[in-house]
Image (tube, grey):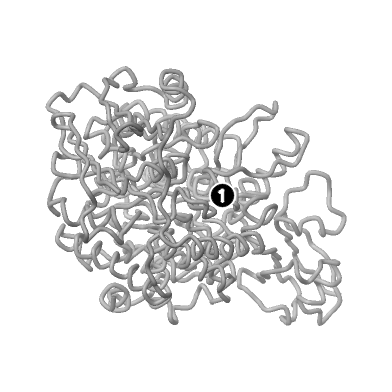
Amino acid sequence: MITITLKLFATLSRFMPEKKENELPGIPRQIKIPHNSTLSDLIILLKIPADEVKLCYVNGVYQEINYRLQENDEVGIFPPIGGG
Amino acid sequence: MWFIRINMTDQTYKLEPVPQEYQYFAGRGLTSKLVASEVPPMAHPLGPNNKLVFSTGFVTGTSAPTSARMSVGAKSPLTHGIKEANVGSTFPPEFSKMHIKALIVEGQPADKNKYWGITLAWDEAEGKPVIEFFDASEYKGQDLYEMFPKVYGKFGDKISIASFGNAAEFSYGNSGIVFNDLEKRPSRYAGRGGLGAVMASKKLKLIILKAKGAPGVEIKNKDLFESGRKKMVDALMSHAITKPKGGLNSYGTAVLVNILNEAGGLPTRNFSSGRFEGAPKIAGEAIFENNKTRTGKEVYNHACSPGCIIRCSNTYYKPNGEEHVSCIEYESGWALGANCGIDDLDKVAEMVRLCNAYGLDTIETGTSIGVAMEAGVLEFGDADGSLALIHKIGHGEDIGRIVGAGTGPAGQTLGVTRVPAVKGQGMPAYEPRAVKGIGITYATTTMGADHTAGYTIAPEILGVMGKQDPLSNEGKAGLSQAFQATTAFIDSSGHCLFIAFAILDIPDGYQGMIDEVNGVLGTNWTADDILEHGKEILRIERDFNAAAGIGKEANRVPEFMKYEPLPPHNQTFDIPDEVLDSVYGDL
């Protein structure tokens, strides 16, 4: 297993494991996941429907979902959003 | 269709038929073409020779969705170049329905102590607009939240209002023109570049619209218009960002706080970092969660103007469940929050409310306070000090007069080297060193630092129209130019720029916009034609700026961004000058 820091934003925050009452989306949580997991594996593990995921950032950089996660990676997952 | 010229020197007006050369311009295209043609480039922005122009877009006032926008243009007292700012309100569609193509405010009265108002109504007997002048001096110096109900009380509920607050009366470079929202709040702004001060310099405190009986917008080809409108509705109703209960309707524009923070591009503490540890506390999600706790229900956002499908404007509630303010936009919450090192959302909400009360641009206020913090006037993170400073700005007290002048002038006066401004105007909520394309837009746009002028954030951060690497320079000059030209057309169409999220991903929606415009005008414009129309507007604006002494040498980001690496990516802004020059050189 490896440890990553996970942040789920906007509508995806409901998929945060053991989400606490009134916990703000975007507050980081450390979780353990299997070695060699990709972002896609993580999304399945969290039971997030694939079509709700638009963007994944790892350590501040956008990554495709076949990206293989490393120990201590910081992962942020977003649904489609816009603003300005 | 008419041009209405308001002469403030002698308080007279005249209606003119629209000259042929202006027939196919509207919104930003029309305000910029008129300013460029009629304002001497070296005129003082607050003097008698500047002109303030209001114009709605091609489809404003029709049933086209999300199209209740108006452009306001003049020479800017902040950038000293051409300026266009646009706004959504009930005002624009009512204006269009009276067959007014442009309202041009000229001259200046000799009496500097008296303010005027005008009522602009539809004369059914004559079949044309009619204007009456009145003494509006009683509204001078008033909090806009107190003034608006008085104006409605006197002129009736069915009016639309354009006005300005204290900030404009002090001639600040940071002063907007305020319009009413659907709930009669003084909360919708043509905010940027000090246009409020231009209106105040004309001593025109109030424009009151009464469109009752007006005939509505003429549509030359109704079938084509209707087909285009349906395509636009379908695009907006189906795209995940713009649809009901989608990203914008649920969380508002402030949903961007977290993603820019994640991407390392959220300017923090006066552009000294791209990450703010307090970001989740001031984000759209926090607004939504606080509202849910405080009102006992999920609160979705409302429309700023009639006929909007996207409905992105939020209302923020106090702990006791009473309304605090509408609206905390992404830019506002960032400028007064992360940029000042403040993570207390209730304090940020109060700062936004004060900006609305005094008629200040929230972006410029936050970036100006940021440079004041840099100068040691107050500490980063000092929310109460910031609130006190906004009161000083609003009342014209001591250092408030300096900070109210805007980011560039305030930074210069306070001796700050880290001044995040282009052409004097404060940068919005995206860091050029972490998102290179938007830096090119900030540097080169005719408007001074302005994200809306060429919103490359869509592909660079949000994955709209594909996904591009924000840290890469590759192809970004062309990307910025294409966005700037397309935006100049959207700003002329009458649509809100946020339709771009849907129509850049859905080609039928893009064609829908073209069909709507062709339907109204009876033209046969193609996608190439509208891009060329956008470029023509940019050339007009570029040439005015050059004649005003703001040539390509002004199209640069501030120097500190070239030598200070920005955490967390530790990048500088490294786009060569000749690449920046190509954006407008190749138009």
Position of residue B100 measured from the top left corner of the image (x, y, whole percent): 32, 45
- State which quadrant residue A33 falls in: bottom right
Residue A20, can we see it? yes
- State which quadrant residue B114 falls in: top left
Which residue is at the front of the view, B438 or B490?
B490
Which residue is at the front of the view, B564 or B140?
B140
Q: Is residue B175 left or right of residue B7?
A: right
Which residue is at the front of the view, B132 or A83?
B132
Position of residue B35 measured from the top left corner of the image (x, y, whole percent): 21, 52
Amino acid carrying mark 1 in the image: Cys
Q: Is residue B205 left or right of residue B21?
A: right
Position of residue B274 measured from the top left corner of the image (x, y, whole percent): 52, 60
Which residue is at the front of the view, B535 or B104?
B104
The chain carrying label 1 is B
**Residue drawn at 41 percent across, 22 percent down:** B155
Residue that mark 1 sits on: B308
